[in-house]
Image: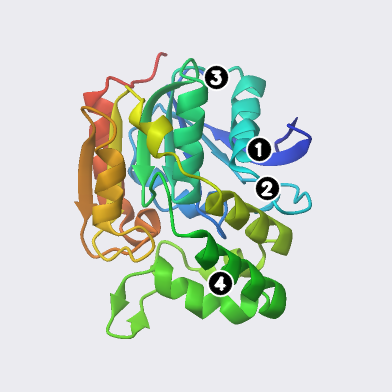
Amino acid sequence: MPFAEVNGTRLHYLDEGPRGGAPLVMLHALGTNLRLWDAVLPHLPDGLRIIRVDLRGHGQSDAPPAPYSMGALVRDVEGLLDHLKLRNVMLCGLSLGGMIAQGLAVKRLDQIRSLVLAGTAAKIGMPQLWNDRINAVHKHGLSELADDIAKHWFLRKGRDFVPPDGLPDWRGMLISTSVDGYTGCAAAVSGTDFYTPTSGLRLPTLGLVGIDDRATPPDLMRETIDLIPGSRFEIIRKAGHLTCAEQPEAFAVYLSGFIQDTGHFPTL
């Protein structure tokens, strides 16, 4: 089981596909782990080298004491890519992962060739919202808050959310996240405003958002994607926040098209 010691933290990751394949790095959302992408992978082109990582405090990665900074999360991924000697990667991030992707692209253009930003924004929510969430997690625990969090994750029909087939153990994934990991990353999101740095990016970028995304609504997502000249923006139907789990085939169609359009092919 692969682990890397980077930035003072042991990170768990999966590195799958041919070593000479075009690298695609995938960063998950807050309260999930690298398994978030499972349902997408079978629909992607053959020959890619796909790297998925459990962000600090999530999955099988270490959980240092909270709070975390966005800079620390960016350095974690930066260090992992250096550890794997990867350059010119396509970096795909959802929600928290999309914020990290923006920060790393600004910092290390030698590492990043193109971006796929899903259900994310240059700034997500106000500090009070995140402070309330952090306090609630400390008071009640993630198991008590799971249904409330899921209402922001998944497509809603009336008052009900609809857990997708592509993420059958979403509750187990969430409640297995450490309190330090969840609240630490929530604090990082709370303190981040990437509007100015992201507006300076000049690289191929695809934005994807669910039509019923209540965490990062389409208008907010479009505002961020429009900061990057020449970027593309697509809305995925019948999906909320976790588009890659709710509509994995549609997500893969857009991602595969972007791979083709940007010439990000295996180098075997």
Q: Nearer the viewer, mark 3 or mark 1?
A: 1
Q: CA distance from mark 2 to mark 3?
A: 25 Å
Q: Give the mark nearest the N terminus, 4 or 3.
A: 3
Residue at 35% across, 57% down: 216
Image vertical order of residue 123 relative to residue 105, above or below: below
Amino acid type for the residue under numbered disc 3: Leu
Q: Horizontally, is 59 left or right of 96 in the view?
A: right
> On the rendered structure, is 151 left or right of 80?
left
Q: Where, by quadrant of the figure, is residue 203 drawn?
A: top left
Q: Position of residue 258 (x, y in %)?
A: 26, 32
Tell us which disc is closer to us: 2 or 4: 2
Crowd rating for badge 1 (residues with CA inside 10 Å; few <14, some 14–19, many 20+): some
Mark 4 element type: helix
> Residue 72, which numbered label?
1
Marker disc for residue 171: 4
Circle 2 residue = 68
Is residue 255 at all visible to an observer of this figure?
A: no
Label 2 – label 1 distance at C-alpha: 7 Å
240 shown above or below 196: below
User: Does the CB distance between marks 3 and 1 fall below 8 Å?
Assistant: no
Q: Which residue is mark 3?
A: 86
